[in-house]
Image (tube, coloured by chain):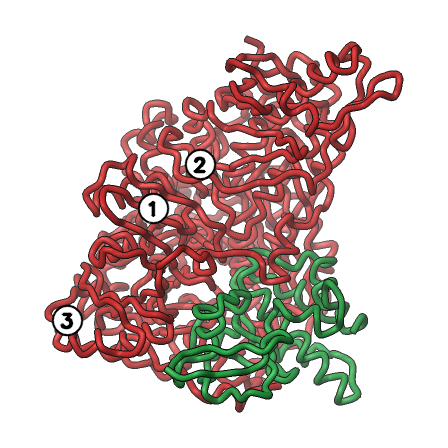
Amino acid sequence: MAKHTFKLNGEPVTVDVEDDVRLLWVLRDVLKVTGPKYGCGINVCKACTSHINGKAFNPCSVQVKDIVESDEITTIEGLPDTVGQDLHPMQEAWLERDVVQCGYCQPGQIMAAVALVKKVKADGRSISDADLDSIRNICRCGTYNRIREAIKEGADRM
Amino acid sequence: MTDVLPSQDDDVTPDGSPEATGASRRTFIGYVMAGTTLAVGVDFSFGASRAEAAVPSVPQIPELFDLEDLQTKSALPTSTLITIEIGEDGIARFAMPRAEVGQGITTAAAMIIADELDLPLERVEVSLAPARPELLFNQLTGGSNTMNSMYYPIRVAAATARGALLEAAAILLGAEVSGLVAKAGVITGAGGKSATYGELSKKAASKTTKKVKVTIKKSSDLTIIGTPQNRIDALAAVTGRKRFTADLDVPDALPTMVCRPPTLNGKPGAVKNQAAVEKMPGVTDVAVIDTGVAVRAATFGQCIDAVRALDVAWKGGPVDGESDDSVLRKLKGAELPMAVPKVPLLAKTIDMRFEFMFRSSAALEPNCAIADVRGKKATVWAGLKSPIVAQKDIADAIGLAQNNVTVNVVTSGGSFGHKLFNDGALEAAKISKAMGKPVKLMWHRCDEPRQGRVHPMCTSRVRATVLANQVLTFEQRHTGVQTDFSHGLGERLTSMVGELPTGLGNLGLAESIFTLTQELPYNFGVVTQLLNEVNLKFNTGSMRNIYSPDVACANELLIDRLAQEMRKDPLEFRMSFLKSKKAKKALAKVAEVGNWGRTMEPGTAQGIAIHSEYKGATAVLVEIDTRPETVNRPIRDGVTGPRVTKAVIAIDVGLVVNPRGLEAQMMGGVADGIALVLTSSNHLKDGGFLEGSWDNYFYTRQWNVPPSFECIVMPSNGKVVGGAGEAGVPATVAATACAYARATGTVPTRFPINHDTLSFEPKPFVPPIPPSPTDGLSYTY
């Protein structure tokens, strides 16, 4: 066991856990932060998508020892705080379009969407069908079309 | 007793206007339950009688009496205990004896309660009832039957609560009930004096349970039912607050996984390194159970490491050595012969045969369950669509009386038929008993396609005889690996067997279900559709429709062929042979919205199809692009293939509760249908399925999604709520297959079309699950 300190959703946290435990389990099993979901454990389904220093990543595939003290981890629970609101504009778009079906993949979808829109905007573009096609997050309920609409809507509000 | 429901048969009373229905037809019996705050109950026992004589011509069995009727009828005797409570906080609470798995039934139930009770939607809370064995066959979520069986009972219960609140308000406000107005949870009298439902809850309560006569609202007075509403759990879902089984914090229920055999349903022998694995970081327990070797640890990550480290002597499974080809051979050998009646000499016979591969019904949330089996009691939490069967199976497996097993139903991360089974809950209970500790069991993703439930491989032979412009006969022989119905639908059927229409009683369970669900919607002369199943030891189940997607695919491909034979346009052909107005209207709608018949580029085409089931009709028009530049788009670890570029779906379910929810179900149905035709299947080799994760099992992804999607909810009609959860799939499968055949000029005979190309490197079978990657930071964006 070893102590690991990083910033989680704006607050510093310290956990005592083996170096090689993947961050997803540190979040879910140790810190009880359950927004990021398990869907594959091998960085394929993207259900655990969260942000590290503002960029999308998948904590199922990162050892806790690779996270340093200055790293800021944001999960769906901390997303609204990044804009100082009760809800992030992307979450509002999600509600407006009633995107959710079972909801299991949705935290990951929203975190992926926010990062994608930021990236596209940084490139000086607006979101295209090709950008939407590049999203790898699986929705087994198949609410993909509403996800696409909500991302366009959320991008306008961001 | 005046508890008579309006006829359930909208064929008998087509477009029956609510106004035409007198108050006596809307009057039912409700119960005000004994208690200190208001609780009301309702009996299901009304309404299933049908005027069969009114159905014209010689109908097929589903037209008279389909699976939904069977379920609704079998629900009758046992449902007295469905209750709504009004709290002192003014909130109406309903513990629904069904499972929410994403299909939106809790939202629909809340809408019905809010409407009938004059309460804002946000003041209704719908939870999932735990297993209630007294409900017998009436706690099964399946066959798209929830709204059909619960719509009126929920309305009557809500109306009973409203009546009790009005009576209490009359006393409190010194007024006649007739002079009171209930609105938004407040009852107001003539002089403006008012009381809230919360204030009235205690006053409306009864010391004894009493029977009351209640009248539900006229349809024209309903203001929420039929209007588009957002899901009641959407906010929780988008903020990460929605709790699934794995998110529950049950004390000491530590993460647990199972090391599974390399072949399907193999058994564990000796564990060669148990002591060493028990010493691994985080690991607390290792126990052998019948399905493998269970590991309990501080984190799931440490479970994964321990599962990978276990060295187990595995025994073979019941299908060792089997492969796709060997199973297909067995199916071919079991295909029932066609039995065409005598047709004129000049009639032409057209035969087609299709093969449908195994498919995994796994949801994104893998099998997951929490179990605490200690002493003489057991408590289980899981997403379960058939919790009473789970309770009994668990009790039997761990040697407890059924009433000492509490089964809590947790909202699921998808089902698609998967959660009809209790594989995870049963396994968790066995592990908890073996370890003597609470466990939180989760299947590794890799366990799902390899050891989890699959939709059976099957073949469908179809034959039609045609003469001039008539179809004289239509025959179908559907042959599949046996479908497991042990989740309780079987019990429902057996309980109803005496009431089944003539001819069904002698059929086996699967054949009965096939006959009850399959309805050919065309006037094709003599029609026979038969099922034969081969009992091979696979872990099967129904994936979002039992037989319909495959059956509809085969039928509609033959219908396109018949149209070609008669030199008719596929749409025109269907319109001229369809039986029901509902089906014709839906088909005409998608043709109009989707611009059927427009000129298409070579390599692209439209396809159109119709499906009738669950008292409704679904029509789908798709456009597909099979040109090389589309098929060969490069995507890492994914399958691109032909792309459905446009999908238009029209759904007629009869009475519509929530059109927004219905549209969501159709969207999902289209995504499923596309996957079934183009990309998703399991490959069986040497007794094991090769697929190990979502990079092998190619469910529809964003790059496969039709950029243009449109759903038309046909105007609400009749008094019956048809099924929605599964209705979108069959017509999508059929339309996509037809479009592909028209675009390429070749009718595919094996589905999905990419099955013969293995698009991935199979993951090893020993250890049974892949290592957790460490390079996640190199994929940030």
Q: Nearer the viewer, residue B454 or B658?
A: B658
Q: Nearer the viewer, residue B145 or A3?
A: A3
Chain of the residue under the numbered disc 3 shown in the image: B
The residue carrying mark 3 is B314
The answer for how far apart the CA atoms under marks 1 and 3 are is: 31 Å
The residue carrying mark 2 is B67
Q: Nearer the viewer, residue A95 or B299?
A: B299
Secondary structure state at the residue bearing disc 3: strand
Residue B293 visible, this angle: yes
Number of numbered discs = 3
Chain identifier, green in the render? A
Which circle, 3 or 2, is nearer the viewer? 3
Mark 1 or mark 3, earlier in chain: 3
Residue B669 visible, this angle: no
Q: Is residue B157 above or below residue B517?
A: above
Mark 2 surroundings within 10 Å by alpha-carbon count, few (fewer than 14), some (14 through 19), many (20 or more): many
- Seen at 32% across and 23% down, the residue is B498
* Residue B392 left/right relative to B251: left
Chain identifier, red in the render? B
Q: Are marks 3 and 2 in contact (CB under 8 Å)?
A: no
- Seen at 45% across and 26% down, the residue is B79
Task: Estimate the x, y position of residue B86 in percent, counting from the top left.
Answer: 62, 29
Chain of the residue under the numbered disc 1 shown in the image: B
The answer for how far apart the CA atoms under marks 2 and 1 are is: 33 Å
- Seen at 47% across and 37% down, the residue is B97
Quarter-of-image position of residue B234: bottom right
The residue carrying mark 1 is B379
Mark 1 surroundings within 10 Å by alpha-carbon count, few (fewer than 14), some (14 through 19), many (20 or more): some
Mark 3 or mark 2, earlier in chain: 2
Q: Quadrant of the C terminus of chain B?
A: bottom right
